[in-house]
Image (spheres, rainbow, N blue to C red):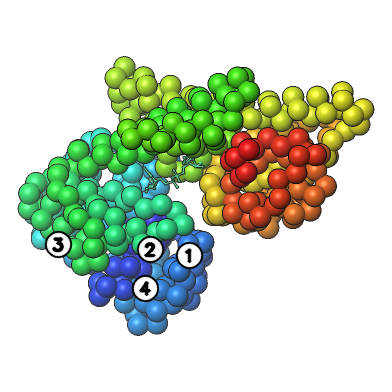
């Protein structure tokens, strides 16, 4: 259930390893495209694999589920209200398969979820189908793949598998063992749920520390990239990299699944979220301030290149992107400067006029790097320009 950035690659790789898979998505165009063997997402190397498993019939897509032996919930968990986790997609996907469930089936949630979600779905299943009480193997197994490296990580990353009981964990382990070469770590569903949230929250906290350093270094006129490189020479120090902020549907989202349920206990996690959100705002203010400084110094409006819209390098994903937030803020507040926005991975975005990154860089007086795409690193660093290298393209 769910043929998105995680569901589709998982369906394809399971099918490639001999599992007969029915991929279900409520979006008819996703289903049609998938059945034509065409990818609706950008992920290196996945297109050929899809074409193969569609041709062999090992995978077929549909808008409605069919009777099976195992059911996987790989649907979004967005927010509702003020960063409240919304598990309604998991619930509605579960309700779609409820009538099909039979004794001995496996039911797994892969969607990132607040602690206790699997318990809630267990209760829903057995309330609606009391005759099945205790006869379904119910487990939670979060995905851990990095967009851009999904095919490798889906097979080689270790997985955490948490059943509602030992038998359910066994059944889930047996399923993933068909295509996962990484170690399958056994636990219970609540621990597995919090483990996923912990992984992404720990990264968010570490990035918040790096972004904090970048603000300190800006004020102290110290090169933050050099500072971190030197500090990481210490055997027990491993600082991540500052950036224009934290985006995507994972690191910028999952910590709220902890802070919403444990507000008192998770203040450090909440503060890190605030820090990484603030970094995007700080970058926008820095750009606007630099425009004013240029105008005062040169007596004319500058040409400003805003480099990148994606939430991280070398992908086309703009979800929760700090770069987009910065561009929108600067576009709104800017008076007079000519803004050249470039994003090599998308041809259009909202009503923004996009400029080729080489032309934007060439023409610009002020250059702000918002995403560290590899293409940008081919551009020679030019001291005649006012460069705000938030994304660390040149690390100068
Ligand atoms: N970022 C920094 N500094 C860094 C590393 C990343 O600012 O040193 C920023 C990126 O620019 C981006 C954001 O953090 O805006 C997230 O990028 P990412 O590459 O750290 O992670 P995601 O969101 O693409 O994928 C994460 C991964 N989680 C961890 O590494 C703990 C991935 O393994 C998960 O499967 C994925 O979230 C998910 O789906 O949860």
Quote the CA–CA distance across marks 2 and 3: 20 Å
Mark 4 crowd level (few <14, some 14–19, many ≥20, 10 Å Cα): many
Q: Specify which label sits upstream in the sequence, 3 or 4.
A: 4
Is the C-beta separation of discs 2 and 1 under 8 Å? yes
Q: Quadrant of the C terminus?
A: top right
Quote the CA–CA distance across marks 2 and 1: 8 Å
Report which quarter residue 226 is drawn in: top right
Q: Specify which label sits upstream in the sequence, 4 or 2.
A: 4
Left or right of 35 in this view: 221: right
Q: Which is nearer the eye, 158 or 109? A: 158
Quote the CA–CA distance across marks 1 and 3: 28 Å
Check disc 2 and report its element: helix, strand or loop: helix
Residue under pointer 4? 60
Q: Nearer the viewer, mark 1 or mark 3?
A: 1
Q: Which mark is residue 44?
A: 1
Position of residue 90 measured from the top left corner of the image (x, y, whole percent): 32, 47
Quote the CA–CA distance across marks 1 and 4: 21 Å
Quote the CA–CA distance across marks 3 and 4: 23 Å
Q: Which mark is residue 174?
A: 3
Mark 3 crowd level (few <14, some 14–19, many ≥20, 10 Å Cα): few
Residue under pointer 2? 151
Taking the image in four quarters, ligand 1 sits in the one at top left
Check disc 3 and report its element: helix, strand or loop: helix
Q: Tell me what residue is drawn at x 34 percent, y 73 percent.
A: 59
Q: Specify which label sits upstream in the sequence, 2 or 1.
A: 1
Q: Tell me what residue is drawn at x 33 percent, y 35 percent.
A: 235
Position of residue 394 measured from the top left corner of the image (x, y, whole percent): 62, 43
The answer to whether the residue bearing label 2 lies less than 8 angstroms from the nearest atom of ligand 1 is no
Q: Specify which label sits upstream in the sequence, 2 or 3.
A: 2
Left or right of 2 in this view: 227: right
Q: Tell me what residue is drawn at x 71 percent, y 50 percent.
A: 380
């Amino acid at each position: 259930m769910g043929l998105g950035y995680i569901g589709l690659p998982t369906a394809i790789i399971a099918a490639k390893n001999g599992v007969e898979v029915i991929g279900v998505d409520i979006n008819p165009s996703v289903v049609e495209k998938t059945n034509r063997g065409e990818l609706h997402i950008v992920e290196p190397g996945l297109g050929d694999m899809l074409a193969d498993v569609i041709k062999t019939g090992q995978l077929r897509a549909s808008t409605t589920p069919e009777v099976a032996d195992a059911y996987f919930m790989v649907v979004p968990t967005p927010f509702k209200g003020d960063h409240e986790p919304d598990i309604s997609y998991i619930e509605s996907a579960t309700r779609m398969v409820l009538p099909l469930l039979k004794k001995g089936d496996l039911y797994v949630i892969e969607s990132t979820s607040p602690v206790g979600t699997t318990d809630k779905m267990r209760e829903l299943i057995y309330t609606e189908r009391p005759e099945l009480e205790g006869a379904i193997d119910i487990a939670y197994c979060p995905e851990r793949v990095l967009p851009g490296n999904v095919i490798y990580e889906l097979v080689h990353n270790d997985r955490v598998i948490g059943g509602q009981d030992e038998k359910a964990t066994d059944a889930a382990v047996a399923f993933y063992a068909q295509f996962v070469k990484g170690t399958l770590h056994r636990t219970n569903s609540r621990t597995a749920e919090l483990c996923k949230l912990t992984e992404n929250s720990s990264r968010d906290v570490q990035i918040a520390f790096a972004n904090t350093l970048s603000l300190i270094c800006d004020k102290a006129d110290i090169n933050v990239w050099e500072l971190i490189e030197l500090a990481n020479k210490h055997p027990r120090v491993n600082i991540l990299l500052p950036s224009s902020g934290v985006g995507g549907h994972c690191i910028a989202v999952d910590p709220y699944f902890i802070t919403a349920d444990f507000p008192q206990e998770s203040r450090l996690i909440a503060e890190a979220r605030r820090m990484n959100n603030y970094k995007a705002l700080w970058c926008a203010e820095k750009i606007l301030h630099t425009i004013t400084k240029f105008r005062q110094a040169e007596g004319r409006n500058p040409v400003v290149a805003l480099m990148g819209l994606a939430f991280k390098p070398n992908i086309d994903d703009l979800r929760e992107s700090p770069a987009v937030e910065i561009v929108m803020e600067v576009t709104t507040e800017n008076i007079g400067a000519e803004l050249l926005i470039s994003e090599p991975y998308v041809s259009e975005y909202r009503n923004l006029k996009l400029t080729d990154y080489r032309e934007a860089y060439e023409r610009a007086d002020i250059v702000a790097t918002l995403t560290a795409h590899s293409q940008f690193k081919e551009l020679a660093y030019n001291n005649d320009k006012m460069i705000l290298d938030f994304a660390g393209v040149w690390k100068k």
